Image: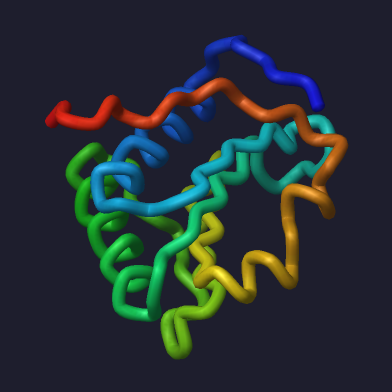
Amino acid sequence: MTTITVETDSYSTARQIADILDNKKAEHITLLDVSDLIQITEVFVIATGSSRRQVLTLADELSIQMKAADHGPLRTEGREDALWLLIDFGDVVVHLFQMEPRRHYDLERLWGNAPRLEWEPATVGEG
């Protein structure tokens, strides 16, 4: 697994999204650079919520904050059951899972050739 540090707008956006999710207590946040593997987006941000309610809260907070930054979502899919909620920001696609569907679909394995982007969660006690 390769880790890259090259900065582009999509990488900055992905890190901003990861920070928002981390602030709302999302777990197991992973950023994958899929730009060389598919043509429709640059980065996948994958995160887990502990329940349907938390997955929906993560999606709502992400939508609010990204709209405020003039980068609102193009579309959202999966709100009904919120087992796997997809939020498309164009250059970044966010996959929000509950734990069991995340284990089942295992996107990190499926996209195993995609380099992981460096990102560190906020230090406990910050913010």
Residue 125, image x, y percentages: 16, 30
On screen, residue 104 above or below 41: below
Residue 61, picture quadrant: bottom left
Drawn side of residue 31 relative to residue 105, left or right: left
Drawn side of residue 62 relative to residue 99, left or right: left
On screen, residue 120 above or below 95: above
Q: Nearer the viewer, residue 46 or 66?
A: 46
Q: Most extreme residue toward the bottom, as rendered?
A: 80
Drawn side of residue 13 relative to residue 117, left or right: left
**Residue at 49% across / 62% down in the picture?**
96
Residue 101, image x, y percentages: 63, 74
**Residue at 32% across / 61% down in the picture?**
58
Report the quarter where the C terminus lies. top left
Q: How many numbered marks appear?
A: 0
**Residue at 22% across / 47% down in the picture?**
65
Q: Most extreme residue toward the front, as rendered?
A: 124
Residue 123, picture quadrant: top left
Q: Most extreme residue toward the top, as rendered?
A: 6
Residue 38, image x, y percentages: 80, 43
**Residue at 61% across / 45% down in the picture?**
44
